[in-house]
């Protein structure tokens, strides 16, 4: 990663900390821990509750329209979602923008098809201790956190896909 991308990743992480009101000790859930349950309305107007997705592999991705690595990552997540959604895989994109319209413009421009939840009050991000942007968690069929990723670097999407495939086989 070049120094410009590294700087953007650091700035994105600092912005999330400032927006969420969390300090540097914030942490995403531990591997093996139960994923904190939450409910939120999706962009389609449907209420989504994480606990109701038990039995499926869930990837939760926290993102914002102002986050350059997010803009790079989201279309790649869209491909993973398209490939595995019929096999027991759910992708929930949790947007933390203060202004929902900013997120909606980006979703439309990128042609994203997965469910997006709007977390402008940052309640879900705080519940999950989001300390980097983007932040991605892969949750198994039993509702346990199996993989945690902070930020985005080229190639992470291959890790996500491998992790999803492995969990779908369990």
Image (tube, grey):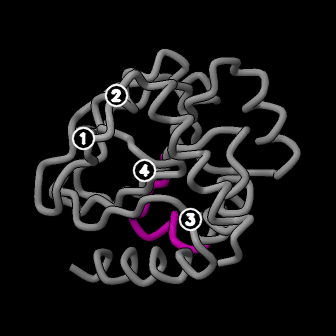
Q: How crowded is mark 3: few (under 14 residues within 10 Å), some or many (20 or more)?
A: some
User: Which quadrant would the C terminus be assigned to in this image?
Assistant: bottom left
Quadrant (top left/top right/bottom left/bottom right) for the N terminus: bottom right
Which tag is nearer the camera, tag 4 or tag 3?
3
Tell me: 11 left or right of 87.
right
The circle on residue 25 is 1
For the point 24% across and 41% down, the residue is 25
Question: Residue 5: which quarter of the image?
Answer: bottom right
Rendered location of residue 90, percent (x, y): 45, 55
Please name which of the two marks, 4 or 2, marks the residue nearer to the observer: 2
Comparing 112 with 102, the one in front is 102
Extreme residue toward the left, this view: 33
Q: Name the residue under label 3.
A: 152
Q: In the rendered image, which quarter is residue 145 located in?
A: bottom left
Q: Which residues fall within the magenta stretch? A: 83-92
The numbered disc on residue 122 is none
Query: In this rendering, which labeled residue sits more in front, label 1 or label 3?
Result: 1
Q: Mark 2 points at which residue?
A: 22
């Amino acid at each position: 990663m070049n120094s410009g991308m590294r700087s953007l990743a650091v700035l994105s992480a600092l912005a999330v900390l400032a927006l969420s009101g969390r300090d540097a000790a914030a942490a995403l859930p531990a591997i093996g821990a139960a994923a904190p349950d939450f409910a939120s309305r999706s962009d389609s107007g449907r209420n989504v509750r994480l606990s109701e997705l038990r039995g499926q592999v869930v990837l939760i991705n926290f993102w914002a329209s102002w986050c350059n690595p997010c803009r790079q990552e989201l279309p790649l997540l869209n491909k993973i979602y398209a490939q595995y959604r019929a096999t027991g895989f759910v992708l929930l994109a949790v947007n933390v923008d203060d202004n929902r319209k900013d997120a909606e413009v980006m979703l439309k421009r990128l042609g994203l098809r997965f469910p997006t939840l709007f977390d402008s009050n940052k309640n879900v991000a705080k519940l999950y201790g989001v300390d980097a942007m983007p932040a991605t968690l892969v949750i198994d069929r039993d509702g346990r956190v199996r993989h945690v990723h902070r930020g985005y670097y080229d190639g992470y999407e291959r890790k996500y896909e491998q992790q999803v495939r492995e969990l779908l086989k369990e």
